[in-house]
Image: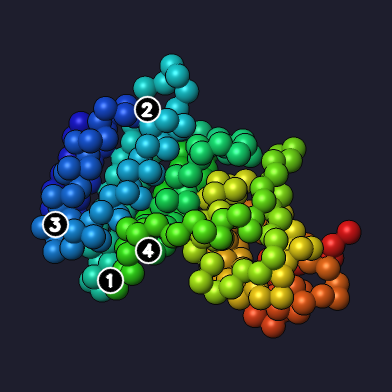
Amino acid sequence: MTDQLADHRWGVEFPARARELSAVRAQLDAWLAAEGLSEDDRYDLLVAVNEAASNAVEHAYGPDEQGLVQIDARATPDGAIRVAVVDHGTWRVPPPTLSARGRGLLLMRENVDEVRVDRGAGGTTVTLVLAPRHAGRGTHPAAPEHEDAVTVTARDGWVEVRVHGDVPGHAEPAVRRRILTAARGGTVPIVVDLLTLGEHSEGLIRSLQAVAEAVAAAGNRLVVRAPAPGHARRALVAAGVDQVVDLVPHP
């Protein structure tokens, strides 16, 4: 494992083996502390970087390949921290199953302020940005009391999400997390069905805006089925969500 420490920059390249990750986290944490980041901000960023690096280690290379993973971090003049996690393997979209696996992109988006995934023939680069005024969303997980408002069904190559009853504003974190988990952070095509949505939907509106952004960043587009006419469609149009999703009538 090789590394370098320079003014406002840090980088490391290491073999794609899980046992390397602990030392990498410790070195990055030391650099972040030297840059003046708080313990909470370091925690959130390290969670996201660890997920990106773990994905590269586990999924970028085949069982007989001896690949490398590169991490480059820099502190920008405005106080943000940008970290790029790079592999030279082959991107494999995870299957749309309902297991607890594949939540890496979700955790990244929950813990940092910007996530960009660039895939190509030569490998994958995941760029993570911690903003100067990071809100620390990922440090305190959302309460799960409204997750039962969402039902998830795996289809052939995609996932269907049905939303039931009222979704008030305070339910947004739990519902957003549930939908993003179903979409495996945005990597799996997803359709959200609003046939049984209740009259109160402000929490869902906010959830769909965040999910649409995550799905678009992963190169997909969110499809929303809503009865026409109906209160769900009116709420989506009023909030401008129809501009960032594919809003289709319910069959």
Q: Nearer the viewer, mark 2 or mark 1?
A: 1
Relative to 102, residue 18 above or below: above
For marks 1 and 3 on the same chain, the one whose residue lies earlier in the sequence? 3
Q: Which residue is identified by label 2? A: 67
Q: Which mark is residue 33?
A: 3
For marks 2 and 1 on the same chain, the one whose residue lies earlier in the sequence? 2
Q: Could you give the CA–CA distance between mark 3 and mark 2, rounded to whole angstroms? A: 29 Å
Mark 2 Cα shell of 10 Å, populated few (<14), some (14-19), many (≥20):
some
Of all residues, the one furthest to the front in this rendering is: 145
In this view of the protein, can residue 209 be seen by the observer? no
For marks 3 and 2 on the same chain, the one whose residue lies earlier in the sequence? 3
Q: Which residue is identified by label 1? A: 132
Judging depth in this view, the residue of 113 and 1 nearest the camera is 113
Judging depth in this view, the residue of 137 and 242 nearest the camera is 137
Q: Position of residue 10 (x, y in %)?
A: 19, 50
For marks 3 and 4 on the same chain, the one whose residue lies earlier in the sequence? 3
Please identify the quadrant where the C terminus is shown: bottom right
Q: Which residue is identified by label 4? A: 137
Q: Is residue 32 left or right of residue 98?
A: left
Q: Quadrant of residue 196?
A: bottom right
Q: Amino acid at mark 3?
A: Ala
Element at badge 3?
helix
Q: Nearer the viewer, mark 4 or mark 1?
A: 4
Q: At 42% across and 21% down in the image, what residue appears?
A: 65
In this view of the protein, can residue 18 be seen by the observer? yes
For marks 2 and 4 on the same chain, the one whose residue lies earlier in the sequence? 2
Q: Could you give the CA–CA distance between mark 3 and mark 4, rounded to whole angstroms? A: 20 Å
Q: Is residue 23 left or right of residue 140?
A: left
- Rendered image coloring scheme: rainbow
Q: At 39% across and 44% down in the image, what residue appears?
A: 52
Element at badge 2?
loop
